[in-house]
Image (spheres, rainbow, N blue to C red):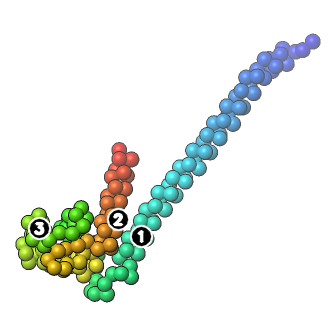
Amino acid sequence: MPSPIDELVKAFEPLMHNIVLLLVAVTIIVVVSIVALAYTATTRTGVEASQERIFESLVSEEEAPRTRRRRGGIGGLGERDVSLLKMLESRESLPVDTLKEESEESPRVLSERLSKLRDEGLVEVSGGVVTLTRRGKRLVELMREKYWYRELEKKRKH
């Protein structure tokens, strides 16, 4: 005759089996989650690092003119320099007169800004028309990506 303890063990055997299966499933889920988080963190860091490498290669690119280089933010560019680049990006090229009207800069200041952008290899000025170079287009594109990633990070934090 089986003892009461043996009967109790037999009664709980299916329950114990289910508990073990549940623990195995939870363990697998936790491990997969940790691996996914580690991969995401590594990938995000990799993307940011690759953007920095792209930007550095853009600044030191062979097509850049061998003229004087300015140090500072983005090649020493200020907020208004960047707004001129963005203005040119949307239209490929603009007459200097149109640029004067839209930027609301004095002719002297605009001339200095355009000279600076030309020295950086970001624009070409020819026949009274300012054109964004391939290098200038890439710089504006990189700035947009950087802004987009910053906004994405802000949304993730909130």
Disc 3: CA contacts within 10 A as few (<14), some (14-19) or many (>=20): few
Disc on res. 142: 2
Q: What residue occupies the far front of the structure in this picture?
A: 127
Residue at 11%, 64% (x, y): give it. Answer: 102
In terms of image quadrants, where is residue 149? Answer: bottom left
Q: Is residue 29 above or below residue 6?
A: below
The answer to whether residue 76 of the structure is visible from this angle is: no
**Mark 3 and mark 2 residues within 8 Å of each other at the beta carbon:** no
Quarter of the figure with the C terminus: top left
Residue at 17%, 74% (x, y): give it. Answer: 129
Q: What element carries label 1?
A: helix
In the rendered image, which residue does mark 1 sit on? 54
Q: Which of 100 and 73 is in front in this view?
A: 100
**Residue 60: percent from the left, percent from the top?**
37, 79
In terms of image quadrants, where is residue 79? Answer: bottom left
Residue kind at label 2, given as amino acid type: Leu
**Mark 1 and mark 2 residues within 8 Å of each other at the beta carbon:** yes
Q: What residue occupies the far right of the structure in this picture?
A: 1
Task: Tell me the distance, in whole angstroms, between the alpha carbons under discs 3 and 2.
Answer: 26 Å
In the rendered image, which residue does mark 3 sit on? 98
